[in-house]
Structure formats: structure tokens, C-alpha cells
Image (cartoon, rainbow, N blue to C red):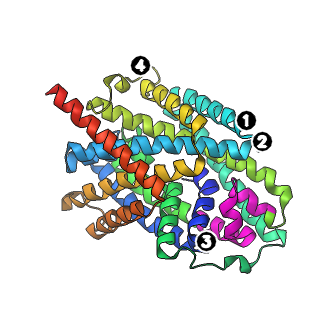
Amino acid sequence: MIGAGVFAAFGPAAGAAGTGLLVGLVLAAVIAYCNAVASAQLAAAYPTSGGTYVYGRERLGHWWGFAAGWGFVVGKTASCAAMALTFASYAVPGPWWAQRIVAVAGVLALATLNYRGVTKTVALTQILVGTSLTALAIVVIGIAAGGNATTAHLDGWTRGGVYGVLQAAGLLFFAFAGYARIATLGEEVRDPRRVIPRAIPSALFIAVIVYLVVGFAALLGAGPDALATASAPLTAAVEAAGSPALAPVVRIGGALAALGALLALIAGIGRTGLAMARHRDLPGWLAAVHPRHKVPHHAEIALAVVVSVLVATADLRGVIGFSSFGVLVYYAVANASALTQPASDRRWPRGLNVLGLVGCLALVVTLPWQSVLAGIAMFALGLAGRWLILRRRA
């Protein structure tokens, strides 16, 4: 979670709700918490790779599991493109074509690293998260010490109204959508029934606190209008606050944060693709596991190719909305699945599952209309394709 989202999502959210993005952030955090406890509860009962794709199949039926898996794979593939583009926008302030080249190079490099095994992925992620937190601390300190931060930038709480706040929450959900990644790696977690339910809520709590502090500081430093138009919002906030000397440090931190998030995404998508291929919901050759490195290497190679194409052709703000659509549907299925669990498997009240389900659906329909239309088309394509394949097999 402490990755590219916090460096990228405040811009689109400010454009939707102005200062009301802080309300949207809290709303996104509440829904994310409901999703997190549902995922943790399900992961304890089904400690296997695949996440909600597996939970949906087990609790609701194969079609629901496929819908969740399809939303995750397609939505998170868009997230990979967003992470790569965020990395390039912070690392290379130059022309767009240079940013695209650097973004593709980042995707290929991290896919190669992940191919070597998940333990190497974890070691590098720890370094990148530490660097990201350091950069975010510098953002807050730089804004506080710059001398230009002002509470006058906090005007405009009602911009966009309730719809704008809900849209900002949906866009900011993009920044939170990493808390259940450990659930998709269930087969590779030590003592998953104990570790996963503890890891997911505690990680989410840390991220929420960090995001609230950084979001408030960014608004004080630059205001919502400047954030909405910036390709690198936190760099713009530091510069506007009067600390331009710190901008290169923030750029480095943003670039490394995006790499860390991209690395984790590649690992999670590969495992969900593996689970879907095992159940013949994706081509069977994606289920291959490397005999030495124990990773789904075919799935990760295919992912690297698709993401590279998206990076070369897509727009950052568009892929954030598209990603949020797919991931919100994924977590709606997770909440519906957790709602059906018996009392013996429950760790949290059912009311949280209901709140999470309703919240996910509300945020989906208030995303930018382009993202909603693209998301509907994407799900229609996936579901129709599965129906045709099943009919042909029959």
C-alpha cells in the first residue's frame, strides 16, 4: 500500500472533490477496512493462492469466483501500468516518450526479479517501503518548513458535492488496494491461519495514518487546484510550499515507491492467474510453476508483455479509474463471500461485510463515467468469453 498510490492518487481525487478529498480518504479507508477483515477471515479459512477468486468459487459458486478473479487480473494489470507510469513521471521529468521507455524498462526489470522467487521480492520490497516512508516524511517536513503552507488552501470542502466525495473515495481506493496481497500469496505464507488475519488489518491501519498526514500536508502546501493539475502531486506540493530543494528527494522517493508497488503487484497477479489457470478459467499454460524458483513463470511473462503494451499506450489518470473499477468489484465479491461464512470461521461481525459490499458498489458507480463504461465492457467481455468456452467444452 505504501507505494505509488500515495504519490499519484491525490491529483485525480483533488480534481473530483477539492479539499473534500480528505473526507473521501476516510471513506475509502472505512471501506478498505471492511474489505480487509473479510479478506483476512476468508484467507484463514482458505490458505491457498488466488485470493477472492478462490473464496468466491468456494462460497458463492464458480461464476462469482471467475468475476472476482477476472476483475482482479484485469484491474491489477491496469494498476501495474499506473505504477510504471508513476515511476516514470517522478523519475524522468522530461518528454513523454522518454517516460514511456523508462516505464517499460522498469516493468521488464521487476518481472525478471520476481521470476527469481518470492523471497527476493520480499527483501527488495522492504528496502523500497523504507525509502518510500522516508520520502513521505520529507514531504511533510518540507511543507511544514517551507513557509508558504496556509490553511487558506483548505477552502472548497463542498466542491463536487456528495458525488465528488464518493468519486474521490473511489479514486483514492486505488492507493489502498494492496492490503490483501498477502492473501493471494497464501500458499507461500508461513502459518497463514495466524499470520494473515493479523497482518492485513495492522498494515491497513499504518497506511491510513500515513495517507491522512500526507494528504493534509499536501493540501496545506499546494491546495486542491495545484494538486489536480500536477503529474507528480507531492513534488508540486513541496515546491509550492517553498521547499524546492527537496523536490529531487521526493522524486526519487516517488519513483522507488512506484517500483515497490509494481513489484508486489506482479507477484499477486501471477498467483491469481495461476489459480484461475488451474481451474481452467484462463489458458492452462499459465498454471506452469518454475521447478527451481517455484513461481508461476508463464503467468508473469505474459503479464510483463501486456503491461508493457499498456504503458506504451495508456494515460495515468485513465488507468487509475479503470483499475479501481475492477478491484472494487473484486472486493464486493470478497465481502459477499465472507457474509456466507459459518460462525465457526468468523472473526469479525457480519455487519462489516454488509457495509463493505454496499460501499464497494457505491464507489463503483460514482467513478468517472469513462472508467465505468470501460469496466462494464471489460466484465462483459470476460463473462461472455467464459460462457462461450464452457459451451464449447460441453
Point out residue 239 in the picture as x, y percentages from the top left corner: 80, 61
Residue bearing the label numbered 1: 98
Q: What's the residue type where badge 3 is placed?
A: Gly
Secondary element at image label 1: helix
Q: Earlier in the sequence, mark 1 or mark 4?
A: 1
Q: Are marks 4 and 3 in contact (CB under 8 Å)?
A: no
Q: Are marks 1 and 3 in contact (CB under 8 Å)?
A: no
Looking at this rendering, what residue extends furthest in the right direction?
245
Q: Are marks 2 and 4 in contact (CB under 8 Å)?
A: no
Q: Residue at x 50, y 37 (%)?
A: 266
Question: Closer to the camera: disc 1 or disc 4?
Answer: 1
Vertical position of residue 211 compared to residue 150: above or below: above
**Which residue is at the front of the view, 213 or 119?**
213
Q: Which residues are magenta?
A: 211-239
Left or right for 378, reference 316: left
- Mark yes or no: residue 318 visible: yes
The crowding category of the residue bearing disc 4, from other C-alpha atoms within 10 Å (few below 14, some 14 to 19, many at least 20), is few
Residue bearing the label numbered 2: 94
Q: Residue at x 27, y 45 (%)?
A: 65
**Which residue is at the front of the view, 318 or 180?**
318
Cα separation, mark 1 vs mark 4, equals: 37 Å
Secondary element at image label 3: helix
Cα separation, mark 3 vs mark 2, equals: 28 Å
Q: What's the residue type where badge 4 is placed?
A: Pro
Residue bearing the label numbered 4: 291
Q: What's the residue type where badge 2 is placed?
A: Gly
